[in-house]
Structure formats: C-alpha cells, structure tokens
C-alpha cells in the first residue's frame, strides 16, 4: 500500500513499529505532491528542508510523533509564509508559531505545506485565492469548496495525512463534504485562535481535516484547551476525544431539522442524507423532527456580523508594519494605494459592507439587529437540543459546483453555506463526514453528512460519526487522480 493513502492512525502504527521513518513519510508526500499538485493546486508553498529538520528530531513516543500535517495558509508557522491567499501578505514570513502549531509540535507532529484558500478565508470555492483556485480531486473542473479548499483537497488527494483549516461560516465542513473527507469545526473557544489571522473573531475556529473520524479525534485531543494568549478560549477540561469511539449509539436521539430539508436542495444530496438517517435508525438511534425556525435569517445575519468584524480586523493591513507596501505620496495616499493593490474584489466588498453596517445611523438597523437575531438562532439550537442528542442534516445543499460557475455571483456563492453558517453564529460544534456520492456528468462527487452538537459535546459527535463511518464504506473511496 502506498504510504500517502494511510490515515494518521495507520501511519502511526508503522512509525512506532519502525517500519517507516518520519523522513520516509515526508519524502512520500513530497513525491505525491510533485506528481499531482500541478492538477490540484492545493498547496501554495512547502518547505521540505525545514520540515525534515523538525522530522529528524520527532519523538515517536508522542501521540502524533512523526506525523506531517498540512496547514491552511492563514495560520502562522515560524519561518514560513502566511499569505492568507492574498497579495497583501506576500512578502511576510511568520515570526512565531500559532498556539495550535506549538501544540502540534509538542505532540510530535510536523507542520508541512501551506494549503491554498480563499483570500482571508472569504469564500466557498477557493476561487478568491489571489494565487488561482484549487481543483477538486474528484473532478478537476469543479471546486473543492472553500474557504479551506486547499486543506480539504490535499487530504482527499493523499498529498497530506491530515490538515488544519479554519471555519467561520462553514469553511471546514463544506470543503470536507465536497472532497469526501472528515472535517470538524469545534465549539467556539475550544481551540485557541492565537496565531490564526482573524477574519470574524466571534465566529472563527480552527479544526482538523482527516481521512477518518478517529484521526479527527486524535488532532482535537492535541489542539484543544485554554490558552492564556486567547482570552476567548474556554477554561474547561479537555476530554479524551477518542473515549466514546466504538460505543454503540442505541437509544440516542438524533434530530432532523425541518428547515434543512427544503426545496432547492440537490435531490441526490437529499436522498443520500435521508438514507444516512435511515442507517442511523438501523443502528438503533431514534430520529425526531426538530425545528430551527430562524434558519432563514442565518445567512443575512452572518453577512452583517462577519463583514462588520472583518472590516475592523483587516484595518491592520495598511502597509506600514508588514505586508504589501505601495509606492505613494503621503500617508492617506499610502493607505489607499496599498489596500487597493493588496486586496482582491471579494475582500474589498466585505470591508465596504462591514464598514457600512457599522456606520452611525445604520448601526442600529443592521449590526445591533443582527446581534439580536443571532441570539434567537442560538436559542433555536438550545430548544432543539432539549429534544435530541445531536442534529443530523446535509452539510452542503449540493455537491461540488463547476469552477467559474458562481465566481461572478456573490449572492449565489453566499448560499453555499446555508446549512453551516448558523452553527458558527450559535458557537456549537459541527462535523461533516462522507455519506455517499452524486453522479454528475459521469463523475462521482462526494456528499457530506453534517452532525451538530451541544457546546463541548465533541466526543459524542465523534462517537455518532464513528458509528456511521465504521458501518459504511464511503470513507474508503479515493479519487482516481
Ligand atoms: N463561505 C463563508 C464566507 O465566505 C464562510 C467562510 C469561512 O468559514 N471562513 O464567509
């Protein structure tokens, strides 16, 4: 078997048995990347020499000892570029490790490769990257999803054993679904955001992309926990995320939200998700209908809150201390030109929108109102979880769409996140795992099943996901690149 197709767990067995070394793993990945990444374009850069220097010192007795992990190009890793998919940060190299990177290193893992993304994580297709889109390994003419499209595609294409991404409105779960792998957005505050370039600070969370549910649990064990460098990180004990894997789910109540099974959802996606729900029934779960009545407001509320926060967060990119610096005459001219040249069109659109909704006279009508509706959305979930242990629904309303199809229609693009956005507004954990394939134009395109849980209930979400994964074969299929 080719080394690169292994899960983390399987690779670890070989590493611990000294059948392969961390350097072998890195070389195998590098060869695979050289062979396929011209087509996929999942990576923006990689530094094999730097990764090898770390691998030579890897302690195999640690939980992720010797395991290379790809990193979305929005998370700082010492000495590496961190472009955020933008021209704005092109010359920048990170002078420090994000907390998640420090934690991965402390667990023996080796960050390797910078994964492509929509500029500053704004988008659902990776087409907003300033460096060209990533292609879906299942059909190279289609999007891998976004904004963490690079992270998802490299794991699906066996160019990485796992990857880290960030999820503000679906950017881990949607690309995981479209690429046929597992992706987890943890509870807000579960994972430190220190060293993650901020998009919308009240929504952003870092999480894993993996080939199996168990691998996601292994990474969550390592990256979760309170961090003095992030005041929004939660001071709560971190449970063993693998603890419940393998326990049966008999008697568990799974909620089907009425508002997530609607007209307009792709019929093949609808059928696959309904079949998955019947499968859960056959595993002994009880299915209950629940209602999330404020779902229809989620996309609107998100595009007020996320843009407001991004307009403030992105104010720091002014060409004074780091990043792109335009030729200019005078200070105001300097700011204007630097930002005009450095940011792409979607980022500018969001900054303008965000500045508008925060401006005096409009603040009450938009921003304040959106915050109130956000509370109603959170209350919907609290009420739903009084009736069920977890929610099951589609991750994305459709399988991967064609590159270029939506690029000029921001509103249509925004609707790609219709089932993932409310999760971030409510701060609850969400997970996507493979649950089937759609046949489109003679190609197989992965479909994702989404599981949503109560705050800090990640171990149970993983248990429910694992029960499905271990009794189905979807996760074993690989794209024929
Ligand atoms: N697609 C959504 C957006 O464009 C979500 C992005 C994300 O989760 N980072 O904002």
Image (cartoon, rainbow, N blue to C red):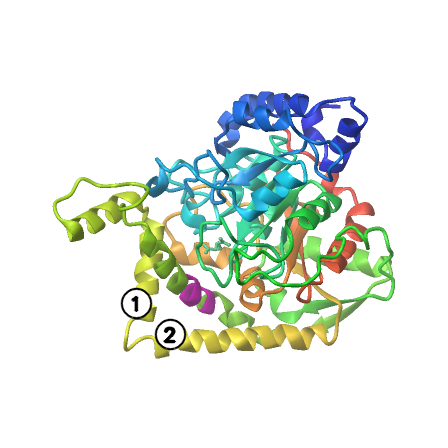
| Residue 140 appears anywhere in the view | no
Q: Which mark is residue 356?
A: 1
Q: Which residue is mark 2?
A: 366
Residue 358 placement (x, y as % from top left)? 33, 70
Residue 131 among those drawn in magenta: no
Q: Residue at x 36, y 49 (%)?
A: 408
Which circle's residue, 2 or 1, is located before the other in the chain?
A: 1
The N terminus, quarter of image: top right
Magenta-colored span? 301-306
Callouts 2 and 1 close, C-beta under 8 Å = yes
Res. 420 image quadrant: bottom right
- Tally the numbered discs: 2
Out of 461 and 145, give the one closest to the viewer.
Answer: 461
Q: Quadrant of the C terminus?
A: top right
Between residues 470 and 393, which one lies in front from this camera angle? 470
Q: Residue at x 64, y 58 (%)?
A: 430
For the residue pair 395 and 28, the one nearer the viewer reads as 28
């Amino acid at each position: 078997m080719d080394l690169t197709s292994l899960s983390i767990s399987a690779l670890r067995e070989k590493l611990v048995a000294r059948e392969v070394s961390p350097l072998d793993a890195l070389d195998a990945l590098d060869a695979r990347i050289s062979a396929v990444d011209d087509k996929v374009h999942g990576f923006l850069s990689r530094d094999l020499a730097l990764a090898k220097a770390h691998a030579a010192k890897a302690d195999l007795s640690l939980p992720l000892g010797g395991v290379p992990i790809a990193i979305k190009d929005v998370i700082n890793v010492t000495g590496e570029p961190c472009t955020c998919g933008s021209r704005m940060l092109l010359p920048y190299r990170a002078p420090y490790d994000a907390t998640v990177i420090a934690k991965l290193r402390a667990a023996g893992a080796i960050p390797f490769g910078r994964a492509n993304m929509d500029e500053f994580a704004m988008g659902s297709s990776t087409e907003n990257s300033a460096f060209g889109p990533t292609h879906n390994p299942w059909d190279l003419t289609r999007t891998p999803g976004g904004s963490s499209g690079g992270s998802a595609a490299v794991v699906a294409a066996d160019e990485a054993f796992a990857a880290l991404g960030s999820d503000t409105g679906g950017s881990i779960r949607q690309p995981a679904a479209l690429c046929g792998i597992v992706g987890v957005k943890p509870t807000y505050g579960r994972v430190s955001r220190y060293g993650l370039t901020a998009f919308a600070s009240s929504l952003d969370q870092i999480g894993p992309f993996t080939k199996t549910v168990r691998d996601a649990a292994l990474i969550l064990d390592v990256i979760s926990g309170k961090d003095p460098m992030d005041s929004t990180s939660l001071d709560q004990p971190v449970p063993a995320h693998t603890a419940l894997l393998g326990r049966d789910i008999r008697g568990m109540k799974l909620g089907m939200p009425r508002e997530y099974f609607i007209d307009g959802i792709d019929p093949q996606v609808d059928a696959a998700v309904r079949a998955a729900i019947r499968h859960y029934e056959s595993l002994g779960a009880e299915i209950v209908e629940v209602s999330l009545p404020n779902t229809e407001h989620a996309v609107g509320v998100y595009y007020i809150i996320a843009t407001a926060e991004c307009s403030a967060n992105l104010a720091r990119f002014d060409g004074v201390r780091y990043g792109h610096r335009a030729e200019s005459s005078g200070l105001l001219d300097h700011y204007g030109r630097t930002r005009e040249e450095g940011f792409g069109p979607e980022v500018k659109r969001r900054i303008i929108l965000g500045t508008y909704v925060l401006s005096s006279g409009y603040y009450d009508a938009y921003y304040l109102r959106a915050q109130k509706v956000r509370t109603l959305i959170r209350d919907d979930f609290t009420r739903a979880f009084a009736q069920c242990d977890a929610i099951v629904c589609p991750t994305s309303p459709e399988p991967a769409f064609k590159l270029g199809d939506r690029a000029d229609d921001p509103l249509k693009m925004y609707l790609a996140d219709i089932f993932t956005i409310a999760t971030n507004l409510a701060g609850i954990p969400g997970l996507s795992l493979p649950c089937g394939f759609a046949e489109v134009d003679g190609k197989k395109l992965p479909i994702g099943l989404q599981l949503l849980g109560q705050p800090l209930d990640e171990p149970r979400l993983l248990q429910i996901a694992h029960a499905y994964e271990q009794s189905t074969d979807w996760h074993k299929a690989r794209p024929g690149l």
